[in-house]
Image (tube, grey):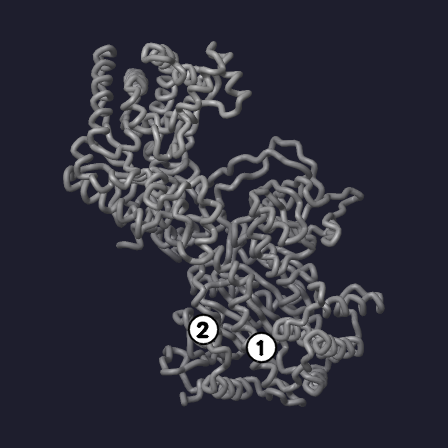
Amino acid sequence: MPTSPARYPSSEPVEIAEKLVYSFGDGQAEGGSHLKELLGGKGANLAEMSRLGIPVPPGFTISTHLCVRYLKEGQLTDALREQVREAIEVLEKSTGRGFGDPDNPLLVSVRSGAKVSMPGMMDTVLNLGLNEDTAAGLAAQSGNDQFAYDSYRRFVAMYGDVVFGARGSNGNDPFEERLHALKQERRVERDIDLSARDLQQLAADFRQIVVEHTDREFPADPWEQLWGAVEAVFRSWNTKRAIDYRRVHKIADDFGTAVNVVAMVYGNIGEDSGTGVAFTRNPSTGASGVFGEFLVNAQGEDVVAGIRDPEPIAAMQTQMPGAYEELLETCSKLEQHFRDMQDVEFTVERGRLYMLQTRTAKRTAQAAVRVAAEMVYGGLIDSNEAVRRVTPEQLDRLLHPTIDPEAAVTVLATGLPASPGAAIGRAVFDADRAAEMGANGEDVILIRRETSPDDFHGMVAAKAILTQRGGMTSHAAVVARGMGKCCVAGCKTIDVDEAARRFRINGHEIHEGDWLTIDGSEGRVIEGKVPLVDPGLDEHFEQLMRWSDEVRLLRVRANADTGPDARRAREFGAEGIGLCRTEHMFFEGDRIHVMREMIVARDEAGRRKALDKLLPWQRQDFTEIFIAMDGLPVTIRLLDPPLHEFLPKTDEEIAGLAKELGVTTERMRHVVDVLTEVNPMLGHRGCRLGMTYPEITEMQARAIFEAACDAAAAGHEVHPEIMVPLVAHVDELRNQETIVRRTAEEVFAEKGRHVEYLVGTMIELPRAALTADEIAEVAEFFSFGTNDLTQTTFGLSRDDAGNFLPQYIEAEILPRDPFESLDVKGVGKLIELGVQLGRRTKGNLKIGICGEHGGDPASIDFCHTTELNYVSCSPFRVPIARLAAAQSALSHQ
């Protein structure tokens, strides 16, 4: 049996075989922040704060290993029970109180705390140790009967819900319903306005509710209460909301949670007491200065749950100036020590400050970038750490739209700007309905009186969240900020009727299905759909990008098909275009008409006549792109899709097109029938079109080189790279390369100018990867088209697999959708082989990828380790790719 925890000094971590319980308090601790995997984030940081001399109520932590074991075996071990009893004895000595002592009761909180923060997802029990006798003792000890019995009824309700699962048949909270009824009888609005006698009776009523709903007597024995609470916290690791949260945030299921048992301190003992939540910086903007909320004469759950509307943290300065100054000093000390923005919970008991928790704060994307940059300026971290600290997902959120400032809006109501950004959706008043509609591709706004962890799945599906109650640190606010969703909380002027699926505001009603726009930056609820605009990026963002560019090895290009797209990509830091899809240039205005004219032509002469009309448009487009990308490479893919994609489908459309083109309907239908393929993905497309209709390749090559010469003549530096798609055999590439180079020489002779260019190919078929050494004899660059390479490797259609791939992910057959994140074990092996074979033939072969995976951080890491030269992605994902490439470089140093 281990030595008593109290004897271990605070300066040295302790390693003991089979040690399950770690104590902290009185300036000492057996653990610390280095033991997060064992003690969870909350327990590790409580221990760390204790070591730092910060006022923390004494307690102990049961390790995460016990959670994993309990969930497998379904029972607590004898060793755990013995070590907990020893830890309680230490806690009794530290506090001078007795666990179960009716005259001087020791009460504790029992809280979860996983390695990775999961705010609100798991269970908590407060005031544990109360029964009829100890409640009377607490009343005598505190001299406040109202406080004692308020604590008792809270405990019975919380324990009855968390441990026994006491719920009404309609899913409602029977404890809340009884409390509400009593307040109506007494004609009071607040819980604290009820008398001690009322609260004592309420506790008795709550115990009876437990019996009625669970057929179990409420335990009076504090030890029985403790074991039940510990097991409940362990079980909460596997609640639906916790599992959903882990899935969204990609947290492993086998971490388990620790259990923290901490001596109670009370913020609801009088007007000289209170509780609050604070951030060491503003979690929405990142601005320096303590930011948070505070409630006088309240427990912490009142702030988090939004039961009462809190005051700004600055209100403490006049109400409890000593505790306020100590809080500011403590927040500064914690941020300096952890070198990151902190989220703290605290209680003031009769003027004395206690810190209940500190953790790395959830923050918006804007705040994440600003905090990282300013911590470099302040010397807390270096620039590499700043790059590591901002996630690619946060940058993605930073690029979310906002309300168009020029738009005329009808503001229905204003609440707290709990999480910035803007979103449009249909009003929905129930989390299940939100999840259902979201799964069907509909944009929804989840509207609740206040959210709870049980609403998490609906919050995930929603574009934004709106609540009637709660503050800036309420459940809705914290969860929304963590997911990057805009949120307006505490919108007091609306009256939400969840049962009727509507809310009222000044005589106006919004019903389920009505369109709303939510402005999380300004806290506005706007009627109808409002135009949104792309966000602006500030100097902190630009600095972070510069730091990223200093360390990354991978270059980042953009997929862009127009001049405006190319300019936008360059603004986001693209170092060239990795994919210009020429077919996208044929769908606008009169171009589609001429393209169809080319397709239905009866012979080569007819096709060339139509292609001559398309040539000026293509040349103009390429000229704009070359000018926009002045000095940077532009990879242009020759025509790729099958020709039937340019033709109509219905009889009515076919007849109309026939009339436009001056051919018979029968002729038009014959063309459509001939070109329609059973499996067009593997059909007459890509280089196969160029083989069959070389005049198409000639026209496109001429347009590219004429545009290049024109741009060069205007003083722009051009670097065209012509990419032949869907090559499976080197001779296909050789055929198309011959046409491209012949056309280039013709244009150069006509223009009296020469530009340097490359001819390469898109590796998007397994055979191309397997014979990359042969293909590299002709190709001057490779670009892996990972969309089609994934399709052809898996034998999956990206357009159809969405019907069943989610089941594969759910069943853990696949870790992620292979069209979202690169399948490293399968598709990745083909890429690695293609790289090795290609560079074996041509050592300086330039290689990149241009599929959607080019903007996925996990796929970018693979590209870094495979030593590709660049990735290419959509313009708005360029900053994400730049950051992800830098983080890959740092992680592999």
Instruction: Choose between 471 and 261: the one closer to the eye.
Output: 261
Mark 1–mark 2 CB contact (< 8 Å):
no
| Of labels 1 and 2, the one closer to you | 2
Report the front residue among 95 and 751.
751
Amino acid type shown at disc 1: Ala
Question: Against 641, is 284 above or below?
Answer: below
What is the three-letter code of the residue carrying label 2? Val
Q: Position of residue 425 (x, y in %)?
A: 62, 42
Q: Which residue is located at x 60 percent, y 59 percent? A: 475
- Looking at the rendering, which quadrant does residue 646 occupy? top left
Q: Residue at x 24, y 24 (%)?
A: 736
The x and y percentages for residue 11 are 38, 78
Distance between the Cα atoms at labels 1 and 2? Answer: 16 Å
In the picture, the quarter occupied by the N terminus is bottom left
Q: Where is mark 2, residue-wise? A: 68
Residue 72, image x and y in percent? 46, 74
Q: Which structural element holds mark 2?
A: helix
Considering depth in this image, is 24 or 236 the residue closer to the camera?
236
Residue 526 appears left or right of 290: right
- Tell me the residue that label 1 is attached to: 229
Rendering quarter of residue 473: bottom right
In the figure, 640 relative to 880: above or below? above
The answer to whether 650 is drawn above or below residue 48 in the figure is: above
Say whether residue 728 is visible: yes
**Residue displayed at 22% across by 33% down:** 729
Taking the image as shown, residue 708 lies to the left or right of residue 396, namely left
Closer to us: 422 or 775: 775
**Circle 1 — which element?**
helix
- Among the two numbered marks 1 and 2 on one chain, the one whose residue lies closer to the N terminus: 2
